[in-house]
Image (cartoon, rainbow, N blue to C red):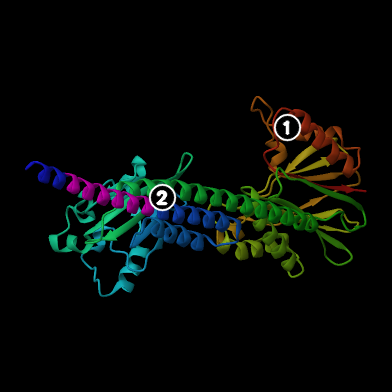
Amino acid sequence: MDYIAPFLLGIATLLVFLVRNQRQLQEKRQKIVVKEHRMFSFLHGLGEALQTSRTREELHQFILKGAMEVVEGAQGALYLLDMKQVRLVPKAMSRQCPPLLPQLLPNYDPTDPARLRSDLLLETVSTDDADSILVGCLSKRESLHVEDFSNHPAFGDASPSDRKKICCDAMLAPMYFGESDLGVMVVLRENGAASFDSNDFAVFGLLADQCSLALGTDQLSRQSIAQQRLEEEILNARDVQRILLPDKAPPLSGYRISGRNRAAGSLSGDYYDFIPLGKHALGVAIADVSGKGLPASLTMVMGRSVLRANTEAWQSPAEALAMVNRILHPDMRTDMFVSMIYLIAKAGSGEIVMARAGHDPALVYRAASNNVEEIAPSGLAVGVDVGPIFERDTQDHSIHLERGDILLLYTDGITEAENSMGDEFGIHQLKTTFADLATSSADEIMDAVYAKVAAFAVDSPQTDDMTMVVLEKT
């Protein structure tokens, strides 16, 4: 019977072990349940956050705070790639987050968390920094659990005293949306606290995936809204631009005058204008801004405004263009310029004074000889030179139109229109077409030229704005 006591003691010990183990399992299960509840609550809030008009900064803070709460992290940070995808930029940071970058360790003062936070928020990480723990996590798209952050190779050059400043347990997760990298999320527990376990790590990876989906969706939504707003603004700008182009020319005794613009896109970098100069003269302008889209359109509007503001003061076209150049040049990009022709036609007389700022040659049909002449006085494009050379080279040039003569101004969108073989419409075809149509009205001439160019480039999209102005001496 002596063996019964040890046997009973063994049974009792086993029961105690099983009870304790069962209690531990229950506690563990309870922790998992609580963590799952926090996670579902966070994801629900994240969905609502995407539906509201939160700023990006608020969304970033919400994501970081929620992730820290779910896995019970004490500190954390959210780094996202910049627009050019070349630097990781801190977008959210807990108030007492330790220095995550080796270069910040020497100046780290735990008694001055405000300064550390400022340093952290200002320090970005180049994606070329192969030694960075953040870059490594993102480039490999692998979550990391670093039980002692200070011993990671990224801090290998730091002194032992500096590494003590960041003795903490850390989890890092890459964030990406489809093929696009987004950034890295970091959550930490201070040294001495319970380490993150495998369940924490698994939950943190799932959180990062869901947060990545939220950030990617938010980016697409904001881009869509921004694109829609841009399209609306471009449409508004197009309407304003069309208002600035004249419907018809003011009457001028002895002339029939007409102009037309066909933009290649929503906005045009070409323009033409008719500027009344009292009862007996009319200013006529045509211009082509280098480039396309909004920058060219804005430059066109500025050029039109400056020219209109100075035509009354300058009866010389060359002097008017010189003023336009002096005003526009300081504000123009170095890769932009404006080619222009500005002329003054006097009522009845047939006398026209013209100045050409680097624009395509004007064409004159002479009724008497049935020939087309090129009129190409010297002149620099607006914006190329600040003043002296432009004003030396851009001079007034006088021409005289007899009855039946026609003056054609145009932009290079017409002569440089290409067919499917890459051949240009060219000045020769334009002169031939112009000569064939010389007995037609100004509007008929423009209609026919546009039709001829369209037929020539039938298999190629219009890539440049096309503008024409026709002055017919009656």
The answer to whether residue 318 of the structure is visible from this angle is no
Q: Is residue 309 above or below residue 70?
A: below
Q: Check disc 1 and give the amino acid type.
A: His
Residue 84 x, y percent position in the rendering? 45, 49
Name the residue that disc number 1 marks: 428
User: Which residue of the protein is positioned furthest toward the left in this rendering?
Assistant: 2
Residue 174 x, y percent position in the rendering? 38, 46
Question: Which is nearer the eye, 467 or 8?
Answer: 8
Q: Check disc 2 and give the amino acid type.
A: Gly
Assign the N terminus to one quadrant of the image: top left
Q: Secondary structure at mark 1?
A: helix
Q: Nearer the viewer, mark 2 or mark 1?
A: 2
Residue 258 x, y percent position in the rendering? 86, 49
Q: CA distance from mark 2 to mark 1?
A: 58 Å
The tally of labels here is 2
The answer to whether residue 225 of the structure is visible from this angle is yes
Image point 36% across, 45% down: which residue? 202
* Predominant SS along the magenta part: helix
Label 2 neighbour load within 10 Å: few <14, some 14-19, many 20+? many
Q: Is residue 432 magenta?
A: no
Question: Which is nearer the eye, 80 or 245?
Answer: 80
Q: Is residue 29 magenta?
A: yes
User: Which residue of the protein is positioned furthest toward the top in this rendering?
Assistant: 421
Q: Quadrant of residue 141?
A: top left
Left or right for 359, reference 118: right
Left or right for 157, reference 215: left
Instruction: Give the numbered dot on residue 87.
Output: none
- Which stretch did the figure color magenta? 11-32
Name the residue that disc number 2 marks: 183
